Image: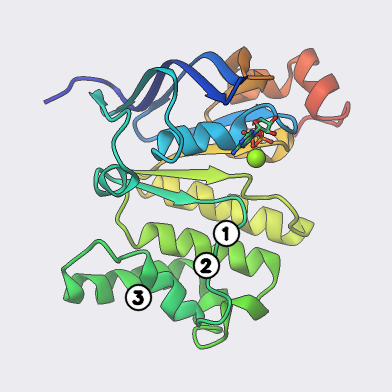
């Protein structure tokens, strides 16, 4: 049994692709039950952070801990079985399969067919737009609807933690609001969330804590409200935009 109050902890992670170092002593924590965002511009190392958590990229040094237990170097399916689901950057849906088939893919590691069917109904209650489109091919959905399918698929694994790569990227303003509301709702149901985002205003509007990544180094961190009003953040990531 672990007493770590963080569902996810990265401890002095260094990652490199060949000779190019991407993370420099990256450390962060996601307290149980919270939404934490990692903000950063293009090529700052956000997606690589997701891949390290999921065991898709091995760090050169440092540790990944889930609920206090080290999982560094474990293969991805083992990490998934420990309660981590992901919503990847490109959503990675099967375009020629229906919404229903894509969502059910999220339960592929589960053997409890009856409970899966119940969970499917419960998950679709969160996404009325998907309920209307259950038999539509995922490839014909709008970007926002595809994002919802990816989120519903993640929930089908009954995760403790969902990691999301730029969930609002490329969405219309209306879909951005819908997706952010859904992330907050999922979190209120007890699922911890770690999201990486370029759009600080989007991420900080629902997050509890945030970290700022600049070329592989954490340069700032704090409560979401404080970050939203931080002059450095406003200049670099909010384009001087009005804080919500
Ligand atoms: N598979 C890879 N091989 C080599 N370099 C990579 C690979 N994936 C990403 N990179 C490089 O690592 C850096 C960080 O990339 P990434 O983590 O995708 O950043 P972000 O998601 O913040 O845009 C970039 O310079 C990118 O070109
Ligand atoms: Mg990325």
Q: Is residue 77 left or right of residue 34?
A: left
Mark 3 or 1, nearer chain start: 1
Report how far apart the C-alphas of labels 1 and 2 lie in the structure: 8 Å
**Residue toward you, 227 or 51:** 51
- Check disc 2: other Cα within 10 Å, few if <14, some if 14-19, many if 20+: many
Report how far apart the C-alphas of labels 2 and 3 lie in the structure: 14 Å
**Residue toward you, 100 or 191:** 100
Mark 1 or 2, nearer chain start: 1
The answer to whether residue 207 shows anywhere in this view is: no
The relative height of residue 103 versus residue 244 in the rendered view (above or below) is below
- Check disc 3: other Cα within 10 Å, few if <14, some if 14-19, many if 20+: few
Ligand 2: does it lie within 8 Å of the C-beta at label 2? Answer: no
The label on residue 121 is: 3
Please give the name of the residue rendered at 25% of the width and 48% of the height, measured from the top-left corner: 81
Q: How is the image coloured?
A: rainbow
Q: Is residue 164 left or right of residue 158?
A: right
Q: How many marks?
A: 3
Mark 2 or 3, nearer chain start: 3
Q: Quadrant of residue 1?
A: top left
The label on residue 149 is: 2
């Amino acid at each position: 049994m672990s007493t770590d109050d963080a569902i996810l902890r990265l401890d002095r992670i260094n990652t490199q692709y060949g000779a190019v170092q991407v993370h420099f002593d990256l450390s962060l924590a996601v307290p149980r039950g919270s939404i934490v965002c990692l903000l950063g511009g293009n090529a700052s190392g956000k997606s690589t952070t997701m891949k390290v958590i999921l065991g898709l990229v091995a760090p050169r040094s440092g540790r990944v801990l889930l609920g206090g237990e080290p999982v560094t170097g474990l293969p991805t399916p083992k990490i998934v079985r420990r309660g981590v689901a992901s919503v990847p950057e490109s959503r990675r849906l099967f375009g020629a399969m229906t919404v229903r088939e894509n969502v059910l893919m999220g339960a592929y590691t589960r053997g409890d067919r009856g409970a899966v069917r119940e969970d499917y109904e419960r998950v679709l209650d969160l996404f009325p737009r998907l309920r209307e489109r259950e038999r539509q091919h995922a490839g014909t959905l709008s970007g926002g609807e595809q994002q919802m399918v990816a989120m519903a698929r993640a929930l089908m694994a009954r995760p403790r933690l969902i990691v999301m790569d730029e969930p609002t990227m490329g969405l219309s303003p209306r879909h951005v609001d819908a997706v952010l509301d859904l992330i907050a709702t999922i979190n209120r149901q007890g699922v911890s969330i770690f999201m990486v985002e370029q759009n600080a205003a989007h991420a900080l509007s629902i997050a509890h804590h945030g970290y700022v990544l600049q070329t592989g180094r954490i340069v700032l961190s704090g409560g979401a409200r404080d970050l939203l009003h931080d002059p450095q953040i406003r200049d670099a990531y909010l384009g001087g935009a009005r804080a919500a």
